[in-house]
Amino acid sequence: MATKTPPDGPVVLTLSPDELSTQTLSTHTLQRALHALHADGLVALANAVSPAHLAALDARMQRDAARLLAQPSDDVHRNFGAATGNIRQEPPTTPSLVHADVVANPFATQLTECVLGPRPVLRFYSANTAARAEGRQPVHVDLEFGGYPTHFAFGYCVNVCLDDVGLENGATEVWLGSHLVGMVEGRECVDVIDEGLEESQAAGEDVLAQGGVGD
């Protein structure tokens, strides 16, 4: 396992040949990943998905994305408006494009089981396509569970990067550690955010390589 932690960025772990062959995280990788999940709310596994699977899925979704982006705004779900360049795009369910290391990644599953318990269930399979744009989405919480015990995870979002992502071509902005602060009655509150802090976070988008899995 190799670890990369950019300044103000997520912990990025590169899986070893032994981990890839056994499809199992080592105890050291597991410890490092769980620490990042608890401290930052995010960890990235850099090479957790087959490049061939990603290439096939990316080729299909690139074609679908071009078609969606060409449609009128009213016909496509654009997250927070067209200026953000972010659209809702469903992955194909053609059997040849549904891969276990994407929909049920063994490494992400192992991490999830350590926090949530055995036999986690996939409840939602979808995608956001982040195209390069001038606009920026407002800070928001994707999902909340009102009344759930404070700071205790009830689920995880597993993101699979089909291509290298960064500021040049579109990325997801994540506020590391925000799950530990700003809680009001068991829910994350983003209604009031200091404008200076929000502006300083603008350059903190994830920069991850193809095949990276973010949990």
Image (cartoon, rainbow, N blue to C red):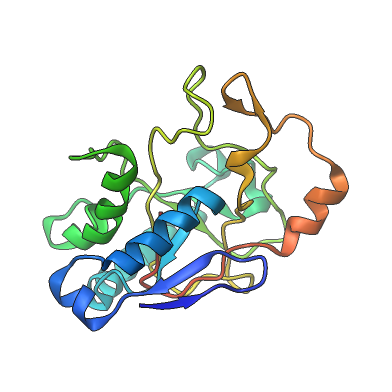
Quarter of the image for the C terminus: give it: bottom left
Task: Tell me what residue is drawn at x 25 percent, y 66 percent.
Answer: 25
The correct choice, above or below, for 30 with respect to 137 in the image is below
**Picture quadrant where residue 132 is located:** bottom right
Task: Tell me what residue is drawn at x 58 percent, y 25 percent.
Answer: 187
Quarter of the image for the N terminus: give it: bottom left
The correct choice, above or below, for 160 with respect to 76 in the image is below
Q: Is residue 34 left or right of residue 16?
A: right
Q: Is residue 100 left or right of residue 30?
A: left
Task: Tell me what residue is drawn at x 70 percent, y 43 percent.
Answer: 138
Residue placed most toward the observer, 128 or 25: 25
Q: Does residue 99 appear in this view?
A: no
Q: How many marks?
A: 0
**Picture quadrant where residue 139 is located:** top right
Residue 51 percent coordinates (x, y): 28, 77
Q: Does residue 95 appear in this view?
A: yes
Residue 162 percent coordinates (x, y): 38, 68
Task: Tell me what residue is drawn at x 21 percent, y 58 percent.
Answer: 106
Residue 166 percent coordinates (x, y): 58, 71
| Most distant residue in the right direction | 196
**Picture quadrant where residue 74 is located:** top right
Residue 53 percent coordinates (x, y): 23, 71
